[in-house]
Image: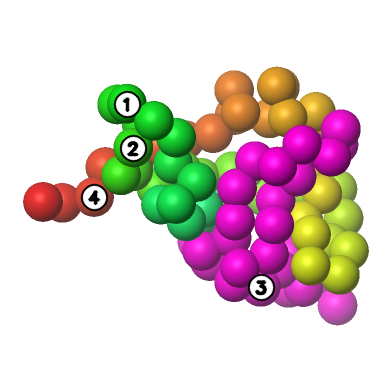
Amino acid sequence: MTVTSKIREHMEVVGADGVHLGTVDKVDGQRIKLTKADSGEGAHKGHHHYIPLALVAEVDGKKVWLSANSDVAVTFEEEKSDPV
């Protein structure tokens, strides 16, 4: 079983430093789509964010661990506005 096939909805996504980055909504192509609840504040609120699957180091129980610390991993996030 590949690491990405172990990723499930509602798993916590954390950086290598253990800091919470988001919650899995679903795997979308080569990215993890995070729930809107973890979309941030201000201009980022209400948008889905995506983390590249290439950053996944391991899937352990209910957590998706990334290979980068949280402060670096957020720089790889993509943002997508949802239609109104």
Cα–Cα gap, marks 3 and 2: 23 Å
**Three-letter amino acid code of the residue under disc 1:** Gly
**Three-letter amino acid code of the residue under disc 3:** Arg
Mark 3, other Cα within 10 Å: few <14 / some 14–19 / many ≥20: some
| Residue 5, horizontal then vertical, whole percent | 73, 73
| Residue 8, horizontal then vertical, whole percent | 66, 73
The numbered disc on residue 82 is 4
State which region is magenta: 1-28
What residue sits 59% from the left and 71% below the top? 9
| Residue 72, horizontal then vertical, whole percent | 71, 22
Image quadrant of residue 75?
top right
For discs 3 and 2, the disc positioned in front in the rendered view: 2
**Numbered disc total:** 4
Secondary structure at badge 1 equals: helix
Cα–Cα gap, marks 4 and 2: 11 Å
Q: Is residue 27 visible?
A: no
For discs 4 and 1, the disc positioned in front in the rendered view: 1
Q: Which residue is mark 2?
A: 45
